Every structure is written in structure tokens, then in C-alpha cells.
Amino acid sequence: MDTDKQEELSVSLEGVANESKSKPVSKEMDNRFSIIEKRNKTLYSYSNDPEKVAFTEKDNKLIANDNNPALIKNMMEVAENKGWEKITVTGDKEFRRDVWMEAKARGLTVNGYAPTKQDERKLERIMEKQNSIGEDKENAITTDVTREVGQDASEKAPKDEIKETSPILPINDEDKEIRRRELKTAYKTLGKEKAIEKFPELEKVYEVGDSAVAFYQSKGGSEKQEWEFRSKATNKAIDEIASGRTLPDFDVSSYKEIQKQIETKKESEIDYG
């Protein structure tokens, strides 16, 4: 008997899925994974590394290739989207604990792991945070980016064009940091078109950057500090997206018009004599 063989890290459906609760794959999942149907199974490979399979779906079972917490979150999203309500988890203790925590937070019943009192207290804190966000949904305020960059635009645009951020279920610190790094790397290295193609939500970040520069110039900011101001605004925007919030719309055209007027004025003031 091979005692060194690692136990399968898997999550299995118990009973029958509730089809009335099923829903399509989220845009975030679609961006993060290449989902390939292959014979009697579905492979979820990383978009930035298609040869690397993150987890596999086969016979009402999700099989993970490792116990990364972010990966477990994605697996539980798939289970929830398919209408799974009761699951059984197998694998090492850390994997089973993390699956239990994520699944219970989504309202699923879990077999295969006996939580400790510490686990239950942690789950309580997660649920309290989710409930708090749900209660505050109607009172959601605009982001720091809106206050710093978009305030001037909000004074000009009709009120029905100004959108507030939309809070969603909380993202833990590790997931947030992973997402932030992914977005920041794409924004800095891929170029605008490819970055937006991979992460459509980055289109708003580019709008923030353009608005920040034009706004800064309209206030008489120096060219030397222009890039620093843009970088500060886009970093905040990326942090908001990584936290699961939606950025408001920006009236980029009005800022560009201000910028154009300033540039025209500067040209007229040049002394060619």
C-alpha cells in the first residue's frame, strides 16, 4: 500500500442540485479561468497559464489540484452557481476546514469536517460582516477615487448619471491582495486593449486615469507631478475593484474639454518674438 499517496482534495454533491438556484458563471470567474469541456469532465485552467489546471469537475464532484484558499473560493462559487446545497468534502484537514468555512458562508450544508469552536467563531465574524454590508447597501457611499477625482465632474453631470459603488459579499484579505496584484500587473504590463480584454473592469481604471490627469491640469497642477497624481488615482481605483466594488462613471469628455482649453490658452501665450 502506498502510504505516501495524497488524499484527493475534492468536494462532492450530496443528493440532487437545486436547479432553481443555478446561475451562469460570473464575469470574474470567466476572466480568471479557461473553462474547457473535455469528454465527461470540465477543466478549469488558469487564463494566464492554460496548461495549468486549477480544478476539475466530473460526476458531480470538484477536484482541486491544491488547497489554495483563493482556489477553494472559486470552487465554492461553482458549486453554489450549480445549485448545490449539500456537499461532502475530502482531503487534508486544512483543505476541509477552508471548504467548510467558504461553503457555510454561502449557506451550504457540509459533511466531512467537524469544525472547532475557533472555526465557528470565525464563521460568525464572516456572517456578521456579510449582514452588515447587506444592511448598509442602500447607504453605500462613493469611493475615495470619486471624492478626490470625480467631485468636479459630479457638479456638472446630471444626478441620474452619477452612480454609487455597489457593495457585494466581502472578499477576504488574501483574495483581495491576489486580485489587486493581477489587476495591477495587467494594467502596467499588457497595454490598454489587452488589459481590458483580460479584465474588462480595468476600462473604468483607464477612465479614472484620464479624468485624474485632466482634472489635475484644470486645477493648475505641474506636469512633473501629473504622473504621480494619475498613479495615485488609478491605484485607488484598482483597490476598489479588488475589494469587489464597482467604480462610478466619470465624465471624461468634460475633463478633456477643460484640458483642451488649457492647452489652447498655453499656446496662445507663447511669445514667438
Image: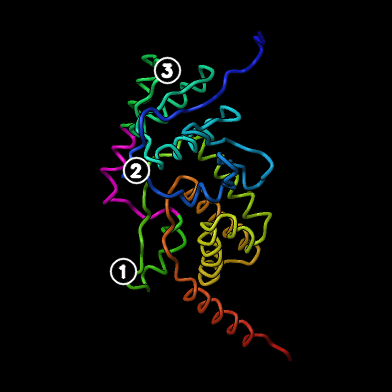
Q: Residue 60: x and y, percent?
A: 46, 33
The furthest residue to the front: 39
Q: Quadrant of the N terminus?
A: top right
Q: Is disc 3 in contact with disc 1, using a CB cutoff of under 8 Å?
A: no
Please say if 215 is above or below 81: below
Q: Residue 131: x and y, percent?
A: 29, 37
Please name the amino acid that badge 3 sits on. Tyr
| Left or right relative to 193: residue 58 | left
Q: Which residue is mark 3?
A: 113
User: Which of the pair 222/141 is nearer the observer?
Assistant: 141
- The answer to which of marks 1 and 2 sits earlier in the sequence is 2
Q: Which residue is mark 2?
A: 19
Is 135 within the magenta? yes
Q: Residue 83: x and y, percent?
A: 37, 39
Which quadrant of the figure has residue 152? bottom left
Q: Residue 196: x and y, percent?
A: 58, 60
Q: Which residue is mark 1?
A: 160
Residue placed at 57% from the left, 22% from the top? Answer: 8
Q: Is disc 2 in contact with disc 3, using a CB cutoff of under 8 Å?
A: no
Q: Quadrant of the C terminus?
A: bottom right
Residue placed at 41% from the left, 69% from the top? Answer: 153
Image label count: 3
Please name the amino acid that badge 2 sits on. Glu
Which quadrant of the figure has residue 226? bottom right
